[in-house]
Amino acid sequence: MRALRLITWGEPPAPTQVDRPVPHGQEALVRVEATGLCHSDLHLTNAPEGVFRYRLPFTLGHEVAGHVAALGSEAEGGTVGERVVLYGPWGCGACDRCAAGMDNYCDRRDTLAWSGAGLGRDGGMAEYVLVPSVRYLVPIGDLAADQAAPLSDAGLTSYHAIAGLRHTLEAGSTAVVIGVGGLGHLAVQILRATTESRVLAVDIREDALALAYRCGAHFGTLLQADTGHVLKARSGGIGPDAVLDFAGTTASMELAASVLRPGGALAVVGSGGGHLTVRKPGALPQGLSLSLPFWGSRPELAEVIALAHSGAIHVETEQFPLSAATEAFERLRRGRVRGRAVLVPD
Ligand code: FEH
Ligand code: ZN
Ligand code: ZN
């Protein structure tokens, strides 16, 4: 079968022919229908040796939807033909966190040479993907694959980040989304669907602000010198109750800290490599809650899929055939993807 594999650190992934996997024991084999492309895939393919603890080679793709093609003899549940999305974080499978479906916060993560499908283990930028257990599969019913796949990472990560600051999102509150890309545009929709907050969006691109409005943002503004004043004014002059930073740069974090209301919450989701100084006494708002959310739990993924089934969230996607993955990577690298890029095996 065809697979896009990371073979050498620092080199682009290579289209490769590999044997179609055969599931044994509790494993399940999924026929891939769509796999989302994530900024983490860019980080992976740019990284020199030693940045990630993963063993090469492996197939990329950690945001995967398809249908069950075969089951190992000891698979507990699962049905051949069932349409599913992969719960992407794969932990040790034995600690309390993994037992609770929170592989994203596995207690033994630092001992593992992988983070999940396409992250040290073979992923879904291929015709088939082998999954260690059906517990990593979430049914999607008749949801389109290009909708379901991004929900397993972009959607789940946004949903989990919002869950961590929901305590600030009461009626009359204001939430700011910095960065309206693959994750941010879903965060806007999830906020509108699950809170009564006023939602303000910030981005550097006009077309991203247009997407934010289509997703239900009450207001959008380009990132510029007076953005802090604009956001404060748009949040009753007292500042937003919560900021979701999908950029994660020093500028975005400092903007968030400069506008947040005392007792507010900042979730830094983007891996922009920025930093924020925490000092007391210091410039950060009193009572600030800071979170660095990572992916989400399996139960949360089922909740995201249910939200999509309810029609509350829709993923803006740009589809590419798997054979055009190089173009998709380049478009993402240049910030020229609207919403989420999705690769479809051709
Ligand atoms: C995965 C592995 C490592 C870093 C970041 C990620 C995210 O893309 C998962 O959402
Ligand atoms: Zn990702
Ligand atoms: Zn674990």
Image (cartoon, helix red, strand yellow):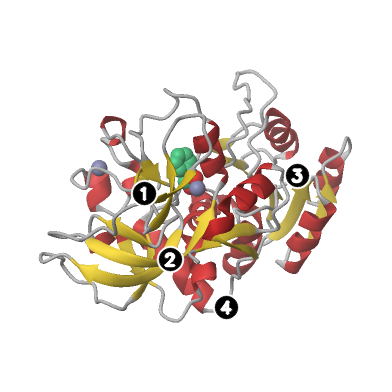
Give how far apart the Cα atoms at labels 1 and 2 are. Answer: 14 Å
* Residue type (three-letter) at the residue carrying disc 2: Ala
Q: In the rendered view of the protein, which quadrant contains the N terminus?
A: bottom left
N-terminal of the pair, mark 1 or mark 4, is 1
Instruction: Report helix, strand or loop for mark 4.
Output: loop
**Which amino acid type is shown beneath numbered disc 4?**
Gly
Which type of secondary structure does the marked residue at label 3 adopt? Answer: loop
Q: Earlier in the sequence, mark 4 or mark 3?
A: 3
Q: Which residue is mark 3?
A: 239
Precedes in sequence: disc 4 or disc 2: 2
**In-front residue for pair 1/127:** 1
> In the figure, is residue 208 to the left or right of 303?
right
Residue 286, by quadrant, is top right
x, y percent for residue 215: 70, 66
Question: Ligand 1: does it lie within 8 Å of the C-beta at label 1?
Answer: yes
Q: Amino acid at mark 1?
A: Pro
Q: Residue 214: image x %, image y %?
A: 75, 68
Q: In front: mark 1 or mark 3?
A: 1
